[in-house]
Amino acid sequence: MSERVAVLEIEGVWKHYHRQNVLRGIDLSVDSHEVVCLIGASGSGKSTLLRCVNLLETIDDGAIHLDGTEITDVRANPDDVRKRIGMVFQAYNLFPYMTVLENITLAPRKAHGVARARAEEEARDLLARFGLADKATAYPDRLSGGQQQRVAIIRALATRPRLLLLDEVTSALDPALVAEVLEIIRELKESGMTMVLATHEMGLARDIADKVCFLDGGVLLEQGTAEQIFTDPREPRTREFLQRVLDARRI
Amino acid sequence: MSDPVSGAVTAPVDGKAWVKSDRQRERERLRRRRDLRSSSIATASTIVFFVLVVWLFTASPGWPRVKETFFDLGQFAGAFPDVLRGFLLNIKIFLIAEPLILVVGLLVALVRNLHAPVFFPLRSLAVLYTDIFRGVPTILVIYLVGFGLPALQLQGMPSDFATLGIIALTLSYGGYVAEVFRSGIDSVHPSQRAAARSLGLTHGQSMRFVVLPQAVRRVVPPLLNDFVSLQKDTALVATIGPLEALRQAQIHAADTFNYTPYLAAALLFILLTIPMARFTDYLAARSQRRRGM
């Protein structure tokens, strides 16, 4: 990384749900080619933060900037913003009535106006790259969980997003299948993709994260390098959380 | 960063309390302005639309004549009590027909879902039933049942035309409703059935306790749609004689060569279907809310 270019800047973001504060003044900056992992207990606000970045939720205060422009501006077109961001969900959210190829080419063709032939060619290239070349015409229900999640990641990549958001993408998978998905994420890091991941996989966070953020009760309590967070956390709450994860032998 | 004070998610973790920022205040002001603008555009366009429609009708060359034959207040008042009395029969017909249709439809749909070879005769009978009664126009079914069944002169066969009308409507709509139920049943993901069977539930039990509850919730809007349609089609029973709303209106219209009584009947039907339509909307909104949209 020669120069630091902020892709995503989150500034004092608040989000309330039913009079509960789910996010309380989150500040976070993600540079180009940087991989940021959000860790924290369930309900700490990781997923909500990702959904806010993708404008699936409206924030109640603060601002989010993508490439220097405010995307939470009332006059900003959410569709244009989302075209520049890819998102992968915990439950895959593939369209069950479409084949793998149709799932992947839908957004390039309809939202980005890419010609069918080219969209399909690119989709097949991506499928080949991630070892799914023979699944192009299969329907999602016919695939294993790991394969489905890989297709979901490819679907998010097909539009060449500036930023990729991954929301606990391995939580619904068994350990054997987790590996194949993590493999993809590692490869994406190699290729320089800017990513924000909410994850329970501390191993992954330690491996690939340039920055690890610990969320607790909607507050970004601590952020630092993976090394610093995992070996020498400053906050007692972070220590407590990591200890609990360790006890559960998830690390 | 200050020290965390408590572990509860609801309590301020490090004493941070929300104070609305100027940025948010400005954003809300812009949002309000945008909402105001879009609602004024909506209001204005609605008014323009209705003014145009009214103008189109009243400015047409035949309007005075139409006004006289369709919108005669005196005729309306004269025919209304009779039409209303007839309309009570329409209400009676569909109130009796609706539960019967639900039972017939559900039974036929369930039979079509029995896949064991023993049930082949039953299953093909169900297929035949839906094919025939969805294929034949409702008004023909009413004629055939209304005049054909009594002609058989069977013991205990009802000869009352309203009852025969109910039978005909039930047969006709049972076919539609069966298909609605069947599509609902088919739309429940196979994994749900697998989960139920894996718990040791029989085919019938998993149908009753797992598949149907989901299927029925999904098909409530199309079912109510069919019932709105049924409410109107009770007027078709007029063709075999009972003095329901349409028949009463016909009698009055034939007396005076004025069509206002038809308008009275139409008004009553609308008054009946609108609550049903709003009820459908309400159910749809409720299921949306439950899914957390």
Image: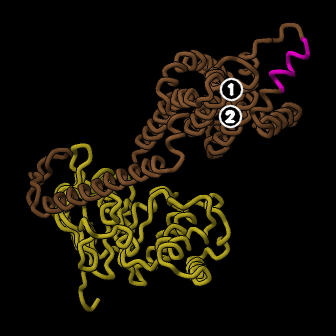
Chain colours: A yellow, B brown
* Mark 2 / mark 1, whichever is N-terminal: 1
Badge 1 sits on which subunit?
Answer: B
Please say if the residues under marks 2 and 1 sit with CB atoms less than 8 Å apart: yes
**Residue B126 rendering spot, x and y as whole percentages:** 81, 33
Q: Tag 1, which secondary structure?
A: helix
Between A180 and B166, the residue placed more toward the observer is B166
Taking the spot 57% from the left edge, 82% from the top edge, the residue there is A115
Residue annotated with mark 1: B101
Residue annotated with mark 2: B177
**Amino acid of disc 1:** Ile
**Residue B275 rendering spot, x and y as whole percentages:** 47, 30
Q: Is residue B150 magenta?
A: yes
Taking the spot 65% from the left edge, 33% from the top edge, the residue there is B206
Between B242 and A244, the residue placed more toward the observer is B242
Mark number displayed over residue B291: none
Task: Say whether residue A221 is visible.
Answer: no
- Left or right: where does residue B150 sit relative to residue A6? right
Count of labels in the image: 2
Q: Does the magenta stretch include residue B228?
A: no
Mark 1 residue crowding within 10 angstroms, few (<14) / some (14–19) / many (20+): many
Q: Main secondary structure of the magenta part?
A: helix
Q: In this view, does A198 lie above or below B110?
A: below
**Amino acid of disc 2:** Val
Task: Tell me the magenta residue range.
Answer: B144-153
- Left or right: where does residue A135 sit relative to residue B84? right
Gap in Å between the C-alphas at discs 2 and 1?
7 Å
